[in-house]
Image: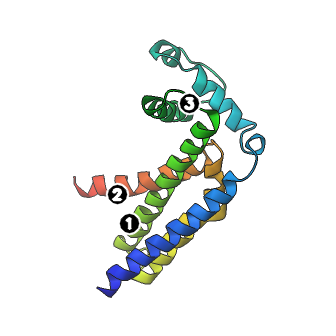
């Protein structure tokens, strides 16, 4: 019972801190959040209009992250008449932040299950540290792939280990 309460409190604490950091990052003007790589990714995503443009894309950037951004754009456009740039950018960030919190939890749990860490308190501390790390949360407020790439590695480790155990 006490263990479940600690888990619940850790999740609430870490998610609240991560959201506060995220909202603080959203307070920065859009021109500071979307420039350089972020702007280029959005331009690529905006140009992906149909399957043929996706199939024939050849640019200086990979197409994975712009496809991710376009999928979020498509999801928003399904429910709204017009998609505003700010809504699109903030939605991208919110999806990445959610994935980051989930990846942090899965990785901390995986680390304990594989005896990299021993105690439950250490797992909760690792989760809180990863999910609220300011640089990783800060990068979710701009549409860049930095935090997403770290999270994909964490997901990859967890899922690869689970798949290898099922062989």
Q: Position of residue 124 (x, y in %)?
A: 45, 76
Residue density around tag 2, few if under 14, some if 14–19, many if 20 or more, within 10 Å: few
Q: Residue at x 36, y 52 (%)?
A: 160
Task: Specify the label residue 161 is tagged with.
Answer: 2
Could you tell me if the residues under marks 3 and 2 are in contact, i.e. CB atoms within 8 Å? no
Quadrant location of the N terminus in the rendered image: bottom left
Question: Given this view, does label 1 or label 2 mark the residue nearer the observer?
Answer: 1
The residue that disc 3 covers is 83
Could you tell me if the residues under marks 1 and 2 are in contact, i.e. CB atoms within 8 Å? yes
For numbered disc 2, what is the local secondary structure?
A: helix
Query: In front: 58, or 29?
Result: 29
Query: In front: 109, or 117?
Result: 109
Q: Is residue 14 above or below residue 70?
A: below
Question: Given this view, does label 3 or label 2 mark the residue nearer the observer?
Answer: 3
For numbered disc 1, what is the local secondary structure?
A: helix
Q: Residue at x 63, y 31 (%)?
A: 42
Q: Is residue 35 above or below residue 155?
A: above
**Residue sticking out furthest to the front:** 81
| Number of dots carrying numbers | 3
The residue that disc 1 covers is 110
Residue density around tag 3, few if under 14, some if 14–19, many if 20 or more, within 10 Å: some
Q: Residue at x 36, y 70 (%)?
A: 114
Query: Label 3 vs label 2: CA separation?
Result: 39 Å
Query: Mark 1 or mark 3: which comes first in sequence?
Result: 3
Q: Position of residue 118 (x, y in %)?
A: 40, 81
Question: Given this view, does label 1 or label 3 mark the residue nearer the observer?
Answer: 3
């Amino acid at each position: 019972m006490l263990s479940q309460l600690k888990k619940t409190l850790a999740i609430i604490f870490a998610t609240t801190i991560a959201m506060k950091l995220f909202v603080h990052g959203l307070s920065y003007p859009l021109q500071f959040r979307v420039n350089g790589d972020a702007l280029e990714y959005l331009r690529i995503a905006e140009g992906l209009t149909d399957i043929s443009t996706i199939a024939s894309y050849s640019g200086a950037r990979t197409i994975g992250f712009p496809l991710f951004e376009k999928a979020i754009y498509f999801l928003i456009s399904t429910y709204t008449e017009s998609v505003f740039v700010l809504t699109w950018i903030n939605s991208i960030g919110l999806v990445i932040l959610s994935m980051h919190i989930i990846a942090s939890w899965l990785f901390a749990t995986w680390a304990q299950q594989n005896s990299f860490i021993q105690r439950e308190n250490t797992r909760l501390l690792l989760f809180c540290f990863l999910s609220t790390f300011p640089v990783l949360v800060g990068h979710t407020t701009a549409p860049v792939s930095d935090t997403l790439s770290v999270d994909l590695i964490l997901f990859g480790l967890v899922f690869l280990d689970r798949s290898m155990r099922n062989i």
